[in-house]
Amino acid sequence: MNMNFKILITLPLLLFCQLLMAEITVKVDRDPVLVDESFNIVFESDQNIDAEPDFSPLNKSFTILNRSNRTSSKYINGKSSYSQMWILSVISNKSGTLDIPSIRFGNESTKPLSVNVVASATATNNKTKDDIFIEIDINTKQPYVQAQVIYTVKLYRAVVTNNASLSEPELTGGQAIVNKLGEDSSFETQRNGKRYVVIQRQYVIFPQSSGNLKIEPLIFQGQTGGAGSFFSFDPFGPQPKSIVKRSERVELDVQPIPDFFTGDTWLPANQLTIQEQWSVDPSSLKQGEATTRTLTLTANGLAASNLPAIKSHLPAELKQYPDQPEFEEKNNANGYIGIRRDKMAIIPTEGGDYTLPAIKIPWWNTDTDQMEIAELPERLIHAKDDAAIQTVKKQAVAADEIPSNTSENKEQSGITTIDSMAEAPIWKWASLLLLVLWLVTLFILWRIKRVSVVENNKPDKKPSIQRHIKKIQQTCKSNDPESTKQALLEWANSLWSEKRINNINAIKEYCDEDFKNKIDDLNNCLYGKTSSAWDGIVFLKSFESQSFEKKKSTAAPGKLEPLYKT
């Protein structure tokens, strides 16, 4: 009995001690790395650890260049969290798949981890003899129109620099959208026996027209510290001198949409998927019960605003009430990740089994260079008959069948008549009247407040909007389609500042059919495979006849600008 009691006491204590044990994770800031490049190994604990870690097992495969510690505490929504980090800047001693061995932190140990180290790059030009130079890396020189291009800049410095600056990419010969990708990163490396500190910066470029597109050389300007360097600085050495370095020019051959792409919307991406979620299981619905269907479209290599609306055709017995779409964007070293969510409430008005057709979205895989189909299979919805609703329907049918001049039959069937309603106490009618008056008063007050807010906000937009409208008038009268497109985008983003409008096709949401056709004509002129005439005066007349702030069509916002075929 005593033994059983000891076991009952010991087991909970062991479980409690297990919960108190710190969890220590290990990760690297990038993988793979070059054999002569430095990278960070990060150890992190969710609890405070007083013991000094033993990092000596790392010396077998790595050289530790620097070590730092960091702690942080957070308190969010009533929950507290703690983090303690050890950050080691290391350089590998050899290439291959190297093991980061288990490291002891007092009584705790980390799990082993591996990192891929590849052989160092061989110098291909004389730039590696310089103390400062720029290298450019681009993932493709023959991208498709509107497909992303990853443009990577590496600035190598073997000496200390002051008042340094690096220009932004400048494009000529075509139209493109350029966005910075993430934050700058830095590391150390060796070239021809010389150590360099490298700053890496990335951009994502979306070409908007096919043909030749040039990325002009980037320019680095700064002052060097004479004979000094990052690793042997002499404060009494020569005085600083100005220096300018330029990168190489990059030329892109932007490809048009392939002839055999059959989709309605051109979607060039690395990967594209479609998923669905339901708030209530569609296989066990009830008649009159609502469920929310969420369709999520995720594309690697496209901005969220370029993703089209997901259309789904439902049987007439299923009522559909769509909500406003939600857009989300993420980015990493591989570029943009665009996410679009379309939500709709679905209510079955009749019991029975219904089939939602499959959803198919053609897209172009830029990795395999072929068209693929993102497909959501068909979905079966089963709705049970609601007894209460069926009873009401039967009573309504019975009421239609009873002769209107037979009061005796009305009383037998239990149908409420106007005469019986009149017998209700007067206080019920008075209460109902007061309730209606109260609701009407609230509605009037809400409308007055809303109109006031709208009127107060309008004057702030007028000067900026008028300036953009004048620019549209000038470009249309000059019959310049490229400049007209850019002026339209600037005007639209000023008018609807709460939205991100990256293509003129999104303006269709706010205009009538005539101006939608004019936008199609402009797209055809800009992106058609054969040249077509464009009349700026006709376009301007249609534009000036619109009332954009008042009209709103049911077209999906943010749809990618289709490149129309002729």
Image: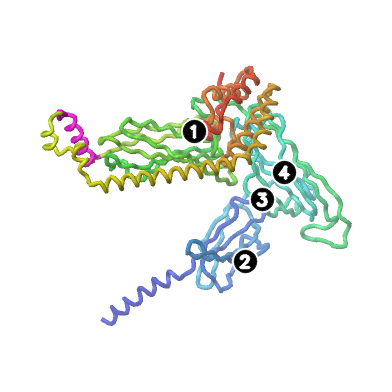
Spatial CA span between label 3 and label 2: 21 Å
N-terminal label among 4 and 3: 4
Spatial CA span between label 1 and label 4: 42 Å
Residue in view at x 58 percent, y 21 percent: 521
Q: Secondary structure at mark 4?
A: strand
Seen from the viewer's position, the closer of residues 336 and 234 is: 336
How busy is the neighbourhood of tag 3: few (under 14 within 10 Å), some, or many (20 plus)? few
Q: Amino acid at mark 2?
A: Asn
Q: Which mark is residue 135?
A: 4
- Residue bearing mark 2: 69
Q: Amino acid at mark 4?
A: Glu
Spatial CA span between label 2 and label 4: 32 Å
Residue in view at x 66 percent, y 61 percent: 63
Q: Amino acid at mark 3?
A: Asp
> Is the Cβ of the residue at disc 4 closer than 8 Å to that at disc 3?
no
| Occupied quadrant, residue 26 | bottom right
Foreground disc of the pair 3, 1: 1
Q: Is residue 390 above or below residue 545?
A: below
Q: Position of residue 557 (x, y in %)?
A: 52, 34
Give the residues in magenta. 384-404
Q: Position of residue 74 (x, y in %)?
A: 54, 64
Q: Which mark is residue 184?
A: 3
Foreground disc of the pair 2, 1: 1
Spatial CA span between label 4 and label 3: 15 Å
> Is the Cβ of the residue at disc 1 closer than 8 Å to that at disc 4?
no
Instruction: From the image, give the main secondary structure of the stretch colored magenta.
Output: helix
Q: Position of residue 238 (x, y in %)?
A: 89, 57
> Is the Cβ of the residue at disc 2 closer than 8 Å to that at disc 4?
no
- Residue bearing mark 1: 556
Q: Using the rendered image of the protein, determine whether residue 295 is visible from the camera's viewpoint.
A: yes
